[in-house]
Image: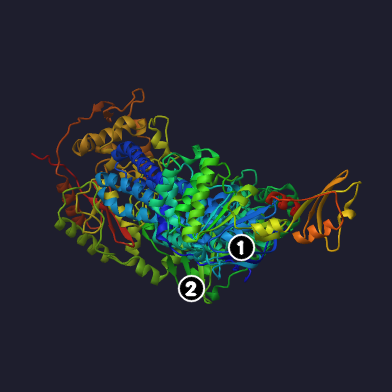
Amino acid sequence: MINAINVTKKFDDFTALDNVNLSVQTGSIFGLVGSNGAGKSTLMRVMSGVYSADGGTVTIDGEDITNRPGVRRNLIYVPDDLYFLPGSSMDRMAKLCESTRARFDRELYASLAEQFEADRKKPIHAMSKGMKRQAALILALASRPDILLIDETFDGLDVIKRHHMREIMVDAVAERGLTVIMATHSMHEVDDMCDAIAMLHKGHINVQSDIQEVTAALVKVQIAFPQAFDEDAVRFDGANIVSFRCDGTVATVVYENDRDLVEHELKAKHPVLMNLLPLSLEEVFIYKCQ
Amino acid sequence: MKDFFRNYVKPQPSKALFLEGMRQLKLPGIVYAAVMALTVLLVNMDIGRGSEYVRHYMMDISVDFAFESVVAIAVLSGFFLFGATLYLSHFLRSGKSRDFYGAAPYSFGTVWLNFAGAVYAWNLIGIAAGHLMHTVFMMFRDPKTIGLCLQAFAGNAAFSLTLFGIMTLSVTLTGRILNALATMAGLAALPSTVWAAFHSTMINFYSFFGFVRQPSGGHCPDPIAYLMEACNFMRTVYSYRDVPPLFEILCSGSAIVYDVVMGLLYLAAAVLFASVRTGDTAGKPFVNKPAHLLALLAVTLSVCCWIASQSGILGRHLVYTLSGQDVYAYGAAGLVLLCAFTVFVWLCELLFTFRLKTSVLALKYLPVPIAAAMVITGIGYLADSAEFTTKINPDQVVSFTLPYNASLDDHLAIFRMADSYGRTVTEDARFTDREVIQYAAEWINQYVEDWQENPRQFYHQKVMGDYSSMRDSYQEYDDGQIGASSQINIRLNLKNGGSITRTVLFDQPHRDQLEKAITGDKTFMQSFLAMPYAAKLNIGMEWVGMTEDDVTAIYKSFVEEYNAMDDAQKLNFLKQELYADYNESLDNEAHLPTVSESDTTEETSDPNQKRRRTVLVSQSYRKGDYIIDQCDIIPGNSLQSPSFYLDIYGYAERHLYQSGYSFSQIFQIDPQRFPKTHALVVKRANDRLPAVLDAIEDHAAKMNYLDVGAAYHGADTFTDLDFYYRTNHMTEEWVDESHEYWEEGNWDDDGNYVEYEIETVKVDSNAIVRRLLDDAKATGNTVDFSKPYCILYIRANDRNRSVSGQFFVQTELRYQPVE
């Protein structure tokens, strides 16, 4: 389990993270989403030990990682901007990983490289963006981490490779309890893979829950009345309207309320039409970050 | 402080990381080692080509060998260290690699410690490759230099450690390569800055980065100053021209120790700073604002001072006679310096931050370094002024010392005696006689009065860079006498344990007075004249084939004779210097003769002659061995074994040394290479001694001393001076200048031109020596100069001093051809 407790990070006068609390269960895939500049990468770096938090702590299985590099011996961080030794091939990077990671598995590395048809001898700088990311992910997985932090997980990978990589990750989670935290802009990925997510916005976490709960937190209703109406017409006691869009006599309203409550209250207003629409994670994110 | 160590993680050695660092530098490291070996090979081959010419003159180039490689290796090592350090420290500057290494289960300090170890390991491999190549070369050329090669390796390894320490600390403190470069320059110059600030604030910029003679100005203890000098990076480049001092500076024991200590300190600081660095600071200067400014101050003060010292624009005033060393003061030019300093500080701030706005804001801090410079200057000026204007009370003086300084030939200036003797005192000469002390105190006090009256008279306008020529001008050659206005250091040792050292101008009246006072110091003279000095003697250059018994017998007779003299006779004996040529022969200092820089003629076709200069080899007897070996001394007759040196042609050598060639060298010299002036000499030399002696006997009436062969005194009496000029002008008499070379004859009294019969005859040179010695014993010290006599020159050395002297030997030397 990895926890970020009241983590604050500042860069000069700018507060990148403000009392962020995050808890990721072992053997889960956690999605970290947020707008640009929300602080996802900063949080990833703090959790991986690259940055030191100005406030709060990060613990791995209860152990504080502050000034204790050994605690993160089984944590791998794959940033969005990848690092490779100049002129190196995958095999050379494998040696580097072997030097820095005690658990690096040569056989697993070879197997993964074969599965993804990766050219291990080819200079990495000559590879495409997707191939570079593929190489980084292979090296990361071959290190057999307990915790894998990935920033922009499948950026550049084609559909097939994404699918395959996803399968490998999920298998690792299921088989040996790998914990994955993925920072991404792709809600589709999060929806597909993640058990839980957190939404980061301007250094704060707006939402942190499992996927179902996140999507269930908002209720989207399409409602129509015989005459034109405004927001007040669909308001009720305790209503928390996140979004209201009206087009003549039909409106789409998003509530941050209990679904049953919304349904009950709106029925009482005798609309001509009322449909409870499913919300995608992307929509939840958009509404939360507005 | 607590905040500084907030992120501290103790660095740990890691085999895996170290090997990874070695792997990352594998290709550049191998290339470096190969380039190093190749470069050293080429350097040695180049010396080898020159050395054949040099060897022809039996000059010792062993030190040159070692020196050339040392410099080449040091320079290459510096380049490799620079590149490798920057390469492996990328995680301190680059966000990408920061992410990789930052997330690894190692602290930055641990990564840096092990990577730094890899950099230095490859550096050592490269240095070892270079020195191995050099050693192999020397094994074939001169096996006795193997010890020097090992010493050079140790010196380079230590020096590179200091360089490496500076580089690692610089990259650890800074965020960009340019910042790192500026910091490196500042750190390299920082020891000298600190030393200069405390030593003498009549801002001695020359010694700041250049030569520092043994400082004795009273502000800084000599050992510390010497150590500072040893580690002065800039001196490495600046002092390139001087061969032996640089070798000693880089590779002497104290230099090695100092470099290792400084290097480890720098590295420790670098690892410490890396241990408290976090990934946040990648690409940024790792200092807070006060530390940033402190670093800026140190860097700019150092570098700006260096720029000023190198600038020929700023007038530099030589202040002599007042301090234990030459000092240079800036008058109005100091203001220019401060202005330049100000601009430089601003530029450095711009470099550090790349932000114009911040740089402009940084101007508000400039009063700090300006004030610091003024305070430093002011304090020193006041201190120096106080010291320079304080008269000395002789009652407070315990003793008077003439500090030994090999490069200044101080004793030569004082003891107007046999030059070889004057030079052979290799330690401080200390006098306790009150008269001597009184004299020295009065001498200095006179200067104090002169200074108070008009300080400007002590200033000498000189543009930077003329130092070497200005230096030479002190040792003027005046009609064959020692320099009329020599400059020496004198030191008065006080009762309170302190000392006062001054550099004084040493003219004839002072010399006479001082010598008179010194020779009255019984204690000093007793030890000074004591004989025998030791069992270790020097080797005869020309007379090979002497047996151990011969050597012992000669030495014993010499000692007996000397010991039988009273002090006055001894002193007189030692003062029998007929030709005051300070550019002289082999002495305790092994002052090897070469062509002096000023002594070139248009006939000289060899460009090497113009560049060669006297190589002063210090009291390393290993080097003495090399010299002697180069001179074809018989094996085994080294300074470690009893032997004897006979230079029957002592005067000849001196004359020839004036031109830069020793008689012994002439034997093997191609006469084509020599100026016309000495053509006759060369020819005679090449024709071997017997033929010369023949010619001498035939024309004895017309010659006094020849500059080759045994010196015969003919019927005519000539003064030494006459002879000197005579031989120098021999071409006027003996050589038909219409010919390119010499005439092989001379005009007799009847106006007939008589050609010399030149033939090569084998001669028993040992017999000649024995004959001379027998005659010397028979003659005693009584010589009738109207009759043929010879000058027998004898020298005895031990590790600390040597003594030599000339015997006038009544003899009519005849050679006996060997059947």
Q: Is residue B326 visible?
A: no
Taking B199 as reference, is B358 above or below it? above
Taking B733 as reference, is B2 above or below it? below
How many numbered marks have been drawn onto this rendered protein structure? 2
Would residue A201 appear left or right of B748 to someone viewing this image?
right
Q: Secondary structure at mark 1?
A: loop
- On residue A181, which mark appears? none
Whole-percent x and y of residue A56?
Answer: 65, 68
Q: CA distance from mark 1 to mark 2?
A: 73 Å
Quick one: label 2, few (<14), some, or many (20+) residues within 10 Å?
Answer: some
Taking B84 as reference, is B659 above or below it? above
Would residue B416 appear left or right of A278 to someone viewing this image?
left
The residue where tag 1 is placed is A52
Name the kind of residue labelled 2 in the image: Arg
Quarter of the image holding residue B685? top left
The residue where tag 2 is placed is B434
Whole-percent x and y of residue B569?
Answer: 32, 63
* In front: label 1 or label 2: 1
Q: Nearer the viewer, residue B702 or B449?
A: B449
